[in-house]
Image (tube, rainbow, N blue to C red):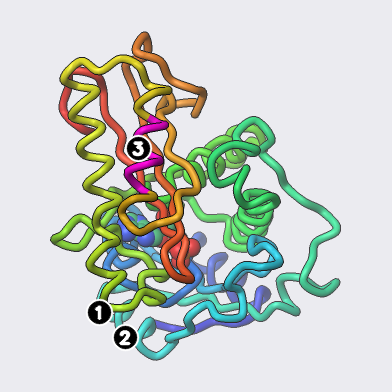
Amino acid sequence: MKIIKSITEIRDIVKSHRQAGQSIGLVPTMGNLHQGHISLVEKMCRHADIVITSIYVNPLQFGKNEDLDAYPKTFEADQQKLETANCNYIFMPSSTEIYPNGNHSKTLVSVNALDGILCGESRPGHFTGVATIVAKLFNIITPDHAIFGLKDYQQFLVIKQMVIDLCLPIKVMGAQIKQKKNGLALSSRNGYLTAEQLEIAPRLNQILNIIKQNIQDGETNFREIEKQAIMIINDSGFKADYFEIRQQDNLEIATVANHKLAIFIAAHIGTARLIDNIRFELNEKTL
Ligand code: AMP
């Protein structure tokens, strides 16, 4: 596994693999890798000949009061995990390579149709930051495949939409959410939690499962369910950000008339903001 820092160098590497007839898969990350990230790399290894994992903490997707400076950096451990997972290259650009004008881009990519709701509403500018960095990575690496975790399901849809709208010849794959045994979705931000908060945190996933079951058992007033869920989240030791039942394919508000549903949860606990979701079809098995 090689570590590449320059755009020119990774472009030359990609070119030589293409000339050898090999396909390229990209796994974009911000580092501090856990088994969720590694599952993306492992899945990509089954789809592409050459796997490139990017590690870049993208300032553009963090709000002013968010955890950019505190974001954990664990490069040596990340490197070992990627080596074990058979990743071929780590692309780790500097900010001066990515944002030559300082930590901003004069050109931004916004997927407006999916912004302004859920995490887009709570974190204004976040998805523009995400779409812009991913567009840059796609232009630098020109992968055949790219993979994103369904834990960040809104992000996954934003990227899929961007690829369609910008006519990018890239196959975007999703990877199932990796959880701890107690249901807590793996996240770099779990590292901010105290032992006590780590005991409470799995409750978010439990709430998703309970509500999913209630809906499958015939509860139909989704708006009332959302209100009740917010109260339960707050009573469980979190500060709820949102709890919403939406349509799985386009994130529009869902009613009982819709079959493919997704429930989204975001809540603050201590200094961390945690998110999770569950996707299912009414009267059918969870996806
Ligand atoms: P991040 O480093 O947090 O930007 O995440 C990089 C990629 O890993 C994104 O596509 C995430 O959706 C994905 N990811 C993060 N946590 C998980 C998880 N628990 N299960 C599956 N994928 C994940």
Mark 2: which amino acid?
A: Gln
- Location of ligand 1 given as a quarter of the image: bottom left
- Residue 12 lies left or right of residue 213; in this view the side is right
Residue 186, position as x, y percentages in the image: 30, 63
- Residue 209 lies left or right of residue 69; in this view the side is left
Query: Which residue is located at x 51 percent, y 61 percent?
Result: 19
Query: Which residue is located at x 50 percent, y 70 percent?
Result: 30
Q: What label does residue 119 carry, if any?
A: none
Local packing at callout 1 (Cα closer than 10 Å; few below 14, some 14-19, many 20+) is few
Local packing at callout 3 (Cα closer than 10 Å; few below 14, some 14-19, many 20+) is many
User: Which residue is disc 2 drawn over?
Assistant: 80
CB within 8 Å, label 1 to label 2:
yes
Q: Would you say residue 44 is visible in this rendering?
A: no
Of 148 and 283, the residue lying toward us: 283
Q: Would you say residue 247 is visible in this rendering?
A: yes
Upstream in sequence: badge 3 or badge 1: 1
Q: Which residues are magenta?
A: 226-233
Upstream in sequence: badge 3 or badge 2: 2
Mark 1: which amino acid?
A: Thr
Q: Choose mark 3 or mark 2, whichever is in front.
A: 3
Magenta-drawn stretch contains 8: no
Residue 206, position as x, y percentages in the image: 22, 47
Query: Which residue is located at x 34 percent, y 50 percent?
Result: 235
User: Which residue is disc 3 drawn over?
Assistant: 229
The answer for how far apart the CA atoms under marks 1 and 2 are is 6 Å
- Pointer 2 residue Cβ closer than 8 Å to ligand 1: no
The answer for how far apart the CA atoms under marks 3 and 2 are is 40 Å
Q: Residue at the bottom extreme?
A: 76
Mark 3: which amino acid?
A: Ala
Residue 95, position as x, y percentages in the image: 70, 77
User: Which residue is disc 1 drawn over?
Assistant: 84
State the predominant SS element of the stretch in magenta. helix
